[in-house]
Image (cartoon, grey):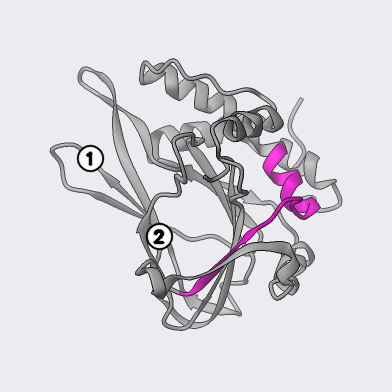
Amino acid sequence: MMNAPAHDFTMPLKERTTVLDWAKAEESLLERGFAKLGPLLSPAECAYFRARYEDEALYRSHIHMARYSFGKGEYKYYRYPLPDPLATMREASFKPLSHIANRWNERLSRGTRYPQAHADYTARCHAKGQQRPTPLILKYEAGDYNCLHQDLYGEEYFPFQMAVLLSDPETEFTGGEFVLVENRPRMQSRPQVVSFKQGEAVVFAVNERPRLGSRGYHRTSLRHGVSEITSGMRYMLGVIYHDAT
């Protein structure tokens, strides 16, 4: 039975997330460290998040990147309970990603196993003192950018995270490409630029990925960032699965 098209926005968001082509995503993640999942949020759902950016009751922290030399721009971490659409995406996408994460650990000879339910993984984070939610919304204006980094937040971290573009690159901003850089042992770093449309989701490696070499799989480290916005305004939703200390 073929999966329903992920761009059918009449489907409930949970089902829409579940029917994404996770098998194809796994192939791309292993080969490139990221996977474009296709349209996930409708324009109205993107507007839902953007319209609530100024509602401070939704957030636990407001970060101005220049203050910490992270780049230029700002972002806000959501507080619990997360908005329903965000919580739905986080929970529904965790199960297929947990299977991929477990197969990655097998390739890298790691004993760590991830549960299928995100609630069980959250309990693991909390037991290690990581209790602050990490999903966030980012806002960039002309001249803003995000330096290469990794979103780890503590000893316990899930190997994938997801980003959803909330603005329309065809009408609302220019520049602001998503950049992923792989640091390969004894080789020059490999940059990759990922462009995607409003409402489209991309999943990528948080820290490292298995890379097949002549002696089997080994680890290569990855960092991600955003190039300079040259005009307009760009909003992005970040779906991170582990909590922070």
Q: What residue is rendered at 39% in x and 41% in y? A: 207
Q: Is residue 147 left or right of residue 80?
A: left
Please give the range of residues in magenta: 73-91
Provide the secondary structure element on which disc 2 rests.
strand
> Of the numbered discs in the image, which one, if any, rests on residue 184?
1
Whether residue 7 can be seen here:
no
Q: What residue is rendered at 38% in x and 66% in y? A: 70
- Callout 1: 10 Å neighbours few (<14), some, many (20+)? some
Q: Position of residue 177 (x, y in %)?
A: 44, 66
Whether residue 216 can be seen here:
yes
Q: What whole-number distance in Å separates the C-alpha atoms at marks 1 and 2?
A: 18 Å
Q: What residue is rendered at 66% in x and 38% in y? A: 93
| Viewer-nearest residue: 123 or 217 | 123
Q: Quadrant of the N terminus?
A: top right
| Viewer-nearest residue: 42 or 90 | 90
| Viewer-nearest residue: 1 or 38 | 38
- Asked if residue 161 lies in the magenta stretch, the reply is no
| Viewer-nearest residue: 222 or 28 | 222
